[in-house]
Image: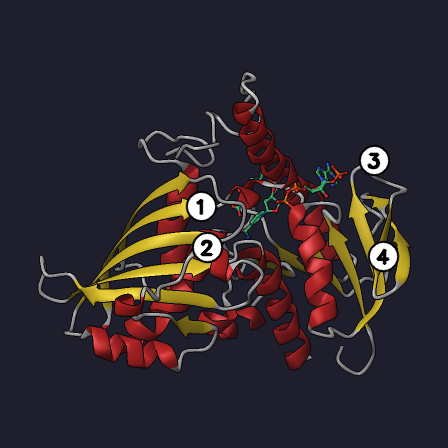
Amino acid sequence: MRKRPVHVAVVGATGAVGEEMFKILAQREFPVGNLLPLASARSAGEKITWRGEEYEVEELTHDSFKNIDIALFSAGGSVSQEFAPSAAKAGAVVIDNTSAFRMDADVPLVVPEVNAHAIRNRPRGIIANPNCSTIQMLVALKPLHDAARIKRIVVSTYQAVSGAGKRAIEELSRQTQDLFSFRDVVCEKFPRQIAFNCIPQIDVFIENGYTKEEMKMVNETKKIMGDDSIRVTATAVRVPVFHAHSESVNVEFERPLSPDEARELLRSAPGVSVVDNPAAKEYPTAIDAAGKDDTFVGRIRKDESVENGLNLWIVSDNIRKGAALNAVQIAEKVLEEA
Ligand code: NAP
Ligand code: 3JM
């Protein structure tokens, strides 16, 4: 595949993730041959400009994938369920950003910094991209797990509205303006007012009282780390931030790991930047991480309530490393092996 340009389809081309996908393909000089933007009938015919050339958005159909080498899907789980098998059947390697196939045993779930090796075994021609909150947490925790073995993770997330798509970004803007103009607030994308609020619900509730988003972090972590013994509990919260998710992560290890040792390991970890000098008010925030590729880690300190515990604050751009960048990095690994 590496010998010639790669023909790439982007499903969900007009969405928040799809648009970032185009930026990252250009920034990383991915060897794109033909580029095919796909979306629903609603935006078919729209034009997008990529690297100075105009491309027309086409309506996604089962026949969209002739001569496509790589199909990047980010148009929702039901779209992937219906159309990803057609793309794979036509010979494309599917890299799917939705939760549709993540937990299927015959679909690898990949964060390149953590388990790039898993990419090779893809009997269905589909590789799944994990949930944004899982990706950034594991980029930071993998080197610590290798050094001291994680027993248990307690995570609370502070997730940006961009994770819920373009209309969600608009909803935070509109509600903020409405409140300052003494107009009533209208909630469409979010279950409650998001402006000046925090909502402890992302995705839907399931029988155990957790949300699906929370259980994605629990289940995906075990699969990606290849270790079912890691215990994980999560609370996922939407906050009125446009870009980048923040996470408060409490980790308990088998063996002792000091904050200094953790900082040292993280300083040389791929995809990680340590920003941790509280005396100088240096710690990562969502504003700093927005538009960047790295996962930023700070506030590294001992959990004094258990034997081998650490607390960390982990921040990353959810649309870049959490979605489009991770998918393009997977595509790069696919090309490397070809
Ligand atoms: P978005 O801004 O709402 O965009 C949705 C995209 O999907 C648009 O391009 C839309 O096209 C397209 N689409 C919707 N229904 C379609 C259909 N029936 N056929 C073809 N295209 C269709 O959402 P987003 O933030 O980009 O997210 C898209 C999806 O990516 C999410 O639903 C989620 O599954 C996944 N995602 C994953 C992560 C992650 O953590 N890995 C993060 C964010 C999102 P139109 O313009 O035609 O409506
Ligand atoms: C992030 O409509 C849908 O199926 C998409 C819901 C969604 C997901 C998902 O479950 O695929 C929105 C935002 C995700 C995700 O990454 O899990």
| Secondary structure of the residue carrying numbered label 2 | helix
On screen, residue 332 above or below 318: below
Q: Residues within 10 Å of mark 1 (few under 14, many from 20)?
A: many
Disc 3 to disc 4, C-alpha distance: 19 Å
On screen, residue 180 above or below 323: above
Instruction: State the residue position of label 1.
Output: 159
Q: Residues within 10 Å of mark 3 (few under 14, many from 20)?
A: few
Could you say where residue 283 lies in the image, as x and y percent from the top left?
35, 64
Disc 1 to disc 4, C-alpha distance: 30 Å
Q: Earlier in the sequence, mark 1 or mark 3?
A: 3
Disc 2 to disc 4, C-alpha distance: 28 Å
Of marks 2 and 1, the one in the foreground: 2
| Secondary structure of the residue carrying numbered label 3 | loop
Q: Amino acid at mark 3?
A: Ala
Callout 1: CB less than 8 Å from ligand 2: no
Q: Amino acid at mark 4?
A: Thr
